[in-house]
Structures are given as structure tokens and as C-alpha cells.
Amino acid sequence: MSALDAAWAALAAHAAHAKKWSLRALFAEDPERFARCSLVFEDLVFDFSKQLVRTETLELLCALARAADLESWRARMFAGAHINSTEDRAALHVALRHRGPEPILCDGRDVMPEVRAELAKMRAFAEAVRSGAVRGARGHSFSDVVNIGIGGSDLGPQMVCRALAHLAPPDLRVHFVSNVDGAHLSPLLARLDPARTLFIVASKTFTTQETMQNAASARAWLTAALGEEAIAQHFVAVSTNAQAVRSFGIPPERSFGFWDWVGGRFSLWSAIGLPIALLLGFARFEELLEGAHSMDRHFATAPLARNLPVVHALLAVWNRDLLGFSTRAVLPYDQRLERLPAFLQQLEMESNGKRVRRDGQPVGRPTCPIVWGEVGTNGQHAFFQLLHQGTEIVPCEFIACVNPDHHLPGHHEKLLANLLAQTQALAFGRTEAEAREALAKAGVRGERLELLARHRTFPGNRPSSTILLDRLTPRALGRLIALFEHSVFVQGVLWEINSFDQWGVELGKELAARLLPALEGGREPQELDPSTRGLLRHIIERRAGIAAQR
Ligand code: G6Q
């Protein structure tokens, strides 16, 4: 048996006991449990004392990490090795936020001079737009920036811009258009003034169907109002494909680059973060990078058992593989983090939603859970019923700031009271005896008391973690995102998968390309299955019918 198989086997044996543990008992037997089962990094607190773990669990999980060679994979990532093996590339997003003078090598070259040069170009452009030095074709300063991109070229910068909008100036708005559905772009264009609108076409490849369609429509809208010559002043591009950017009509000085060693979902630290720099100013974008860099240093150097991304990942694997929980809820108690669940869905599920190992063999155990979530307290009035009393156990991750950035009295205390209460209710529940006692006190008697007591029992023992930040600053957010990024990588190492490719998105793209001609009035593809053929013909007939009526 390999050391890794032995580590999994030891954990499986341990988990057989863990399935009988109760959080009530774990807390009762150890008054120091909070101190023992929480980690602090700068002002970030990660409390995992309400997870179904003991000291021995963490020891066994750390042994698993060592058996999976985590420390050497981590070193290889920082050293620019081609850990993205199926695409034969490095995964070097840590270089994008590296702040020190040291070189970072990739394929024998120091990438830092290029990284710094691109950051300097972003700074100059962001400052010029914000000061009004760079203007549109009619001489107006820009009031609206539209980022056209999808997936990794959308979710990260969008999430950050929403999270930190309280730091944005009142006279600049940033919008994000991703969906190929014209219902995304069309109503936005209807509200915008072409003379004051700047478009960012953000696409690593500059071939993505959705982005190219949206960019073409935006370009047609702009040129209809301001003429072809206005393109160079109203469009910028962020891409690794300089040739395609030039063909679109965007000059090199308005084109921002990045590198093939930056994965889309890890790219918000590159020029893909341009909307962030425009909205918040470059100094704040740099604070975001600094926050991520400080987490990178911690991840690279802290011992496994005190290492936040490592412990976060080990708990995720414990819940998924050993306790068998198939989903994970992300519950930010902060309205500004409303796009965090969507961002993490991509980061985690695109990275680790895989069934074969790096060597092509089946993983043989469950990998990435389904990640989902919603901001609190909204979720409490929607799906928390299932979290507390449903038949599915969902490990939850609560995230909140100790201090708000608004001045409305009375809100934040209620927000935090609710967060703390939910973690308590999930962990400790309410026994049937306690429910009966509460009902009796309220004057309920007899059969009705017996019936209601069953409905009002909370089984508890439902694990959760809580992350607290002092305040939602760019630095704190950068640190939080980097924590999740590294956790995803660690989980991938434990499952022996490559977290940096995404072949699972390809088949649908190919099939859509085969079907598109038929929808555009051309021939139906041959050898179509009866279901798809039936649907395709229905659409074509109904659309023809509608067209005929017009
Ligand atoms: C992310 C994925 C994917 C990608 C989009 C957009 O890691 O690779 O979400 O970001 O498909 O790709 P482009 O940036 O090339 O348009």
C-alpha cells in the first residue's frame, strides 16, 4: 500500500468513529476548543471549532497532505514549474501580486519585469481615465466603463468591484456584461451615453464566442453614434492575443497583456483587474495585491497545521471524502460579497470538478463538492430550513466583517447576532426534550405538545466554519481570495488532480458550433439525436412563424 493510500485508510478508520461524535460533547470535553480550533492571520480569524474534528483528525489530515507531497507541489507552484500538466503550463498567479525585489522564474526567465511593466501601464491608464486626462472621441470624460468578458474574465473583477464599491467615486460606474444573451447588453446600452462610455474587452484568448459577440455589438452601437474613428478612444483590450486585439482595431497602447501561465479564474490580479483599478484607483488595486501577497507568504511558509489555506482545504476534504457531505454552502453575512458565491463556484468547481487524476487514472473518491450560497441574512428566509432540519447535511462557511463601512445605526449588530446564532443552531441544535420543555412553558399540552416537539427539534451537529475580517478593505479582500485560491490548489493536490485546466467546458462549445449554422438559417447537422433534433426544429419553426407574423 502506498503512503498516500495508507493515509486515506487511516482517515477512513478515524471517520468511522467521527460519524458518532457530537459537537455538544466535543465542546463539553474541551473548554479550550475555540482557541485550539481557530487560526488568526493579521486581522483574519478562521474558526473551525464547529467542524466535526478533533486534534487527531487534523494530525491525520496533515499526514495525508504530506503523503500527497503537498509541500513539494506548493514549492513547484511558486517555482513556476509546469504543474498545469495537460496544458503544459505554469500556474503562477502568485507572481502577479509578488511585491518583493526577488525574481520569479518561469521557463528560466524572470517574469517580474513584464509583470511590473504591465502594472505600470495599468496605473498610467487608470489614473488618466480617473483624472479626465484620457477622454472620449467628443472630448468628454468617461462616466461609465463596461467590462465585456466572461468566466474568469468577468467573475473576479466583478466580485471585487461590487465588494469594494463603497470606496468608488460617485461619478464613475463600472458595468459587467458577460452573457451572450442580448438581454444582458441591450438594456445597458439603452442607458449609456456613447460619448462617455469606455469598453474593456477582456478575453485571454480573444476568441470566446460570448465576448466577441458582445464586443461586436458594442462596437456597432458606438460607431453608429460616433463613427469608426472613435473605436481607438472608446475601446481597450485585455488579452494574451495581441494579434486579434489589433485586428479588432484597438491600438497597442490601449491593449493590456498577460501570460499563458495565468489561468482565467486566477487572473483578477493581472490586467483583467483593470476595471478594479479604474473604479477604485490604482493604489487600492495595489492594496488588493498586497493582501494576496501576504497570504501567499503565509501559505508558502507556515507549518501545515497552522497554515490557513491548508487547514481550510483539509477540512473541505474531510467533509467531502470522509464524512460524505456532497455540497458546501458559502454564506457571506455582507451584502457587498453577494457575488462571492458565484466567484467561488467557478474557482472551486472549474478547478476541482474532475474525475481523473493527473496521470489519467480515475480519482476513485469524491472530488469537489457542489459549492453554492447566498448572502445572509437573506438566505435565512429562504433555504436555511433545509440547513437546519433537512435530510442533507451541508457544511457551511460563514464570512463577515466585524465593522461595517456604512453609518446606519442598528444594522450591523443585528447582522452579526444572526450570523452567530446560525452557527450555534447548526452546531448544537435543540433536542426533543428541550423543544418539549419550551412548548410546555408556552402552555402547549398533550398530543399537540408531542407533535410540535418533533417538528421543533433541531438535530444540530451540522458543521460550519466562520471567517471574520475586521473590515472589508482591499487588503483584507485580497487576502481572503488568495486563501480560497490556495485552498483549491491544496484540495486538488490531495485528490491528485490538475486544478488548473478545464477540459469539461469544451464539448458543449464544440456541439454549439455544430448547431449554430442551423439556427442561422443554414443546414441541420447530420446524425442529430431525436431529442435535440426535435427541439431544434421546434425553435426554427416557431421563429419562422414569428418572423412571418411581423
Ligand atoms: C477560467 C476559464 C474560463 C475563461 C472564460 C473566458 O479559468 O478558463 O472561465 O476565463 O472562458 O475566456 P477568455 O478570457 O479567453 O475569453
Image (spheres, rainbow, N blue to C red):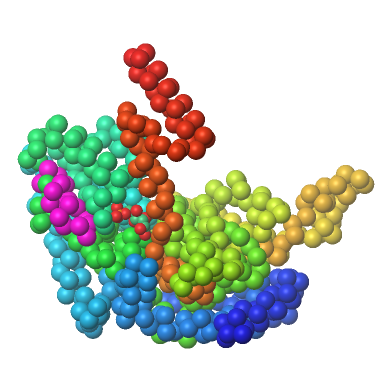
Q: Residue at x 33, y 75 (%)?
A: 82
Q: Residue at x 30, y 78 (%)?
A: 80
Against 283, residue 303 (above or below) is below
Against 392, residue 232 (above or below) is above
Give coordinates of residue 98: x percent, y percent: 27, 75
Q: Residue at x 45, y 72 (%)?
A: 358
Q: Does the magenta run of residues contain 239? A: yes
> In the image, 117: left or right of 506?
left
Q: Tag count in the figure?
A: 0
Q: Nearer the viewer, residue 465 or 485?
A: 485
- Is residue 366 among the parts visible in the rendering? yes
Q: Quadrant of ligand 1?
A: bottom left
Q: Does the magenta run of residues contain 379? A: no
Give coordinates of residue 213: x percent, y percent: 27, 41
Q: Residue at x 59, y 65 (%)?
A: 366
Instruction: State the image quarter where residue 315 is shown.
Output: bottom right
Which quadrant would the C terminus be assigned to in this image? top left
Which quadrant would the N terminus be assigned to in this image? bottom right
Give coordinates of residue 342: x percent, y percent: 45, 53
Instruction: State the image quarter where residue 265 is shown.
Output: bottom left
Which residue is at the far front?
Answer: 527
Instruction: State the image quarter where residue 406 is shown.
Output: bottom left
Which residue is at the far right?
Answer: 446
Give coordinates of residue 505: x percent, y percent: 41, 53
Against 212, residue 416 (above or below) is below
Magenta range is 231-248
> In the image, 158: left or right of 118?
right
- Is residue 62 among the parts visible in the rendering? no
For the stretch drawn in magenta, what is the main secondary structure?
Answer: helix
